[in-house]
Image (cartoon, helix red, strand yellow):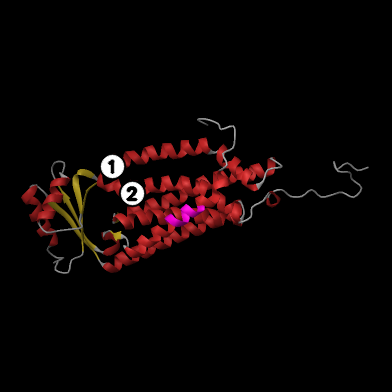
Amino acid sequence: MEFFRIRKDIPFMRHALVFNVISLLTFLLAVFFLFSRGLHLSVEFTGGTLIELSYSQAANLEKLREGLGKAGYSDFSVQNFGSSQDVLIRLPLRADQNTTRIGESVLQALNAETPGASLRRVEFVGPQVGKELAENGALALLLVVIGIVVYLAFRFEWRFSVSAIIANLHDVIIILGFFAFFQWEFSLSVLAAVLAVLGYSVNESVVVFDRVRETFRKVRGLTTPQVLDHAITSTISRTIITHGSTQMMVLSMLLFGGETLYYFALALTIGICFGIYSSVLVASPLVMWLGVSREQFVRPKKQIEGANEDGAVV
């Protein structure tokens, strides 16, 4: 399916060096923010207290946040849990905090603003549990990266796998850089969005690489930059359909999903926008710099002794 078809190939590779320099600068900037500001990790990673409350009617989350703020709590998270009557509150660790009575103190503070709450459960997440969760998340990210490299190496060639994983890691670091610069909360849902972006971006790279391989095999007389330009131009319509429809769904979560899905959808939005750029204008130039050519896809014909140029035996 295509919205449109461009008859003349767009010379993307003519500006490949410019695209790669821009990518390098944004990558280094994101790394700088990661090391200088760091990520604002959520309770799942740092440890803290999870409190679940239940109301007879739909809970007013804004009033709950105001009540917690007046009670002296900070860096907390308030969201619906399962239904509009159930509320989940995340509180970070505090040195002066009495973990045995924190549920009662929170319930007392909230009943002053929105009476009628009943305490359902209180769970304490220790720092060690949060550390293990962070390590498991990093391990999951590493396994996804290794899986992508192996898949692309078997399906195409090592040049494609290396360029694709560099482009995909570029997307991941950019997302983390945004969260570090603005100090947005990095939670498990955001980690899930980062893993989703990895798979989503590599899908676009595979489509372009498939067209590159097909063009090398079917069309003769084109240089490597011309082949890459043709592959990118011929898949632009599909790229717009895929990314546009996906972003429409993500935008609905961003605008109407509430606090629970906000940062998840925000991470996906950043990943989709930069995924288009990296899949087309980062991965393809990298393949060219790594020396991809037609000879790697087309096997030379064996010359039969006594045959002419057309292969006929005379």
Q: Is residue 276 magenta?
A: no
**Residue at horizontal 54%, vertical 57%?**
149
**To which residue does mark 2 refer?**
264
Q: Horizontal and vertical percent for residue 126?
A: 25, 66
Evaluate whether residue 247 shows in this view.
yes
Corner quadrant of residue 7: top right
Residue type pointed to by label 2: Phe
The answer to whether the residue labelled 1 contacts the one labelled 2, judged by CB atoms less than 8 Å apart, is yes
The quarter of the image holding the C terminus is: top right
Q: Horizontal and vertical percent for residue 293?
A: 67, 51
Looking at the picture, tell me which residue is in the foreground, 209 or 286: 286
Looking at the picture, tell me which residue is in the foreground, 143 or 298: 298
Instruction: Check disc 1: other Cα within 10 Å, few if <14, some if 14-19, many if 20+.
Output: some
Q: Main secondary structure of the magenta part?
A: helix
**Residue at horizontal 63%, vertical 44%?**
227
**Residue at horizontal 54%, vertical 52%?**
17
First reached walking from the N terminus: tag 1 or tag 2 = 1
Residue type pointed to by label 1: Gly
Whether 150 is drawn above or below 226: the answer is below
Evaluate whether residue 282 shows in this view.
no
In terms of secondary structure, where does tag 1 sit?
loop
Q: Horizontal and vertical percent for residue 252?
A: 32, 38
Separation (CA) of disc 1 from disc 2: 10 Å
**To which residue does mark 1 refer?**
257
User: How many labels were placed on the picture?
Assistant: 2
